[in-house]
Image (tube, rainbow, N blue to C red):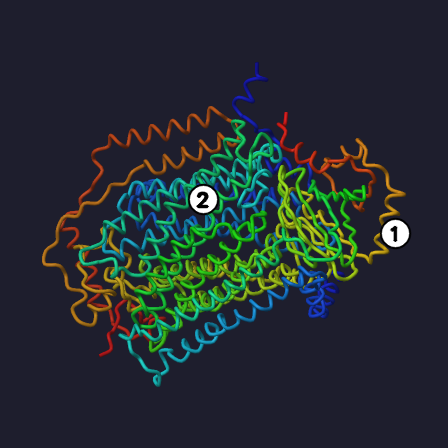
Amino acid sequence: MTGAVWPAVLGRFDWSSLPFVRAWQDPTVSEIIGAGAAAIVVFAAIGVVALITRYRRWGYLWREWFTSLDHKKIGIMYIVLAFVMLSRALVEAVLMRLQQAAAINTPGFLSPDHFAQLFSTHGSIMIFFMAMPFLTGLINYVMPLQIGSRDVAFPLLNSISLWLTGGAAGLMMVSLVIGRFSTGGWSGYPPYTELAFSPDVGPDYWIWALTLGSIGSTLTGLNFAVTIYKMRCPGMDLMRMPLFVWTSLCASILMIFAMPPLTVATALLALDRYLGFHFFTNDLGGDMMNYANLFWLFGHPEVYILILPAFGVYSEVVSTFSSKGLYGYTSLVWATMAIAVLSFTVWVHHFFTMGQSADINAVFGIATMAIGVPTGVKIYDWVWTMFRGEVRFTVPMLYALAFMMTFVLGGFTGILLAFPPLDYLAHNTLFLVAHFHNMLIPGLLYGMLAGYHYWFPKAFGFRLDEKWGRIAFGCWVVGFYLAFMPLYVLGAAGVARRTQEVFEPAFRPWLYVAGLGALVLLCALASLFVQLWVSIKRRDANRVTAGDPWDGRGLEWSISAPPPEYNFASIPRVSRRDPFYDVKRTGDPYAPPAAYQDIRLPKGSMAGPVIGLAGATTAFGLVWHMWWLAILGLLAVIVAVIARSFARDVEKVIDAAEVERTEAAWLSAVAAATPILREGEMSCANQGLAEIPA
Amino acid sequence: MIRWRRRIIVAALTSPLGGCAALKLGVVGHAGPIAAGQWHLYEIVGAVLVFVAGPVLLLTPLIAWHYRLSNRHAAFRPDWNFSWPLEGLIWIPPIGIVIGLAVVLWHYTHTLDPYRPIASPLPALEIEAVALDWKWLFVYPDQHIATINQLAIPVGRPVHVRLTSGTVMQSMLIPQLAGQIYAMPGMTTQLNLAASQPGVYRGENTQFNGPGFQNEKFDVVAMPAADYQRWLAHVGGTAPALDAAAYAQLFQKSSPPQPLFYTSPPPGLFQHIIAKVQEPTP
């Protein structure tokens, strides 16, 4: 009897699914590292729970954060998630670089299987659980403020998206402790990821984590697009929107159209693996080429989902820190839209080597080069924005400058790769790895970090520490060049990516330099955490309560820092681009409204966390073939959706008197603040009030 | 520890040398007409791109520094944000360059198409390559031999490779001779290449296919025609037959430490493997 019960309850689980047991049975360095990573996850989780319990913060976190529908808090939670996942994926990158540096004609310290799991999790996490949450968080926080809105169009959907993403990220962390992850890379190409070749739980973790994440992102895309179309304040015409809003809009449109092919691809692969379908198998007419097309139909627009929001950040940063309106705003808008449209026309360049005709390859190669034109235009627009400006080398501006110089090198190698005959040589080699890191580190990570530094004072009311910001910046830049320039050389020498051992002594110096670079990048991340710690400790000296530390241009700077829950006491009305910059020079930027009114805001809801947790539970049940758990999770999702639809009391009212009190407190802080000139914005004299030179 | 330190010192001293040595293993050290053509294309595109990237690399730091806040001699025009001539300058030359490069791209994509036979008075040597876990099987259908992890070819004669996979998708790359093409189960792809000088060139699978992936390398041995004939005779005279037992071995997951040689591969072996992988797995 018991023989039949346990498999039904535990599915495919057995004791050797636990890395601790594996390390006990086979104490190699590779297994011990795996067990150590699992132990870190377990102890970190226990530690966090213990601390929250010790300080009795569960109620506070649940009420004020987890169930919150406030776009600002949801944005911050997304970014916290991004930093947690960035830490894990960066450590994995360092392990891989050290392994390759150590494994020249010797097996090194990581087994091939462990190494394969590392490159699969590194890629999957960096794309889906670092980059996507970071940009989603940033858009969530900033975009409604920039368009003069009190929230996004669908606040509850926003919370559900967050928790689906969080649940998926949680599944990635669980895969470290229970079972193993896929070895099929972030793109999970079948037939390798089919049951015939990877029968273990790894690809299932990958499938369900991506499925949850991609559903979350599709919903986010819909939410943002509707918000931008429908929730702009009076006077905020499309061509008056800050460029960050434009890039957010383009990224949202791309999410809406590009995420579903991924969801379909992973769903079809799941049908193959679970129900014996044959979409991508070798046998019975399956064809993996369909997978390649579906995946990259998502995968290429995804690149622009990642990069466009960062372009928006750079547009804001370069304009603000040059004290100038953007050069060629209209041109930038057109370039952004052109990139968004063209991004759907180039996916074949991810598999030039699949044997299609030269005509097809040439057409897609030319389309790929064509994308370079609007991208180049954007770079020049930023250069000409600095022209005849007053450039201040703050941390966000440093990231922007490093981006422009570094990204252009990535564009250089990108055009090389757009030539099919050159791609035949560089495809699947470290040259390609170097290229896409050369695009995504400056084109995404630097942008997100610039945005983090730029808007942090708005979100928390104090500036981040300058010194540690500069140290972190230096490490990110130096580390990037050390880690990835050698990979171009190695790739040109034909070194395949994802290789756990190397057999040419000639590669050794380059692998050493790349390994050193990875360590510098780790220092960069550590410096960011030190910076956060130092900044929190010295927060009182760096307060910018008045809300405008950089002589900002958009509406987000016209309110207090941190902003009140309702964002704007009265919905602003704008009559031109850069409205706040303008009103500081021509009118009274801090004039209180004639009368305050009651403000209705959405109440918190537990639907988001419940659906996210239940979704992750379903996914976990499916991974382990614990069918009862999967059904239970799915039922919980359905019940939560139905129950929520009966909720009638979903709004709360902040009454006019309270709004008036909050605003008066802020306005008196503004009155008490000493205005500063731009020379002083990096010093403690900066209280968030800009002095306008005559 | 001392060994490590010595290694690091040696590496530091030899790194310029090592750098060149590494590059010579790639397309820089091309040894055949296809790779030579690809390197030539690299040079053309690289030279053009210097003029694309150069201005940004120069202008960005120059303008940022010149217009720094503390430079009181620099002009400040906060309302200047558009100029038609400048707009023309940032849109038109890039479009022109892309159009020019598109012509180059079209031409070279066709001349260096892996499916395009290499023009030569000599008939192409036919090879059937099968990607396996974690090794390559090369069948010489006209010479009635087969090898594992060694592709011997005569210098100066075109080689026409037909590829498939007996397992998951893989990709065959011989950086000094030609680009790569996927080997896919149940399908056939083609790659034309040739060696113009004798030598041993590294070939590999670049598409990850499991824990033996890193070991899946093979040597392409390019030898003068006479040596190649002697090699054929030697393999034909000494190697065992590719019989049922040897055939079953092929599908074991392994990387043989040394190349293996066989005679009389079953006729139609390549087609047989294509059909085999499409059969329903029990």
Q: What residue do we see at 39% from left, 73% from top? A: B89
Which residue occupies the foreground of this view, A475 or A36? A475
Q: Quadrant of the C terminus of chain A?
A: bottom left
Residue at 32% x, 36% y is A606
Q: Kindly state the secondary structure of the residue where label 2 is placed.
A: helix
State the image coordinates of residue A416 (x, y, percent, origin top left): 55, 62
Is A632 left or right of A233, judged from the image as shown?
A: right
* Residue with the most extreme top position: A1
The answer to which of A420 and A243 lies nearer the viewer is: A420
Q: Is residue A382 left or right of residue A290?
A: left
Amino acid at circle 1: Arg
Label 1 residue SS: helix
Q: As drawn, is B63 to the left or to the right of B176?
A: left
Position of A432 relative to A182 (above/below): below
**On the image, numbered disc 2 is attached to which residue?**
A48
Q: Mark 1: few, some, or many residues within 10 Å (few <14, many ≥20)?
A: few
Q: Quadrant of residue A456?
A: bottom left
On the image, the x and y values in percent for residue A84 come to 46, 49
The residue lying furthest to the bottom in this view is: B73
On the image, the x and y values in percent for residue A557 come to 26, 62
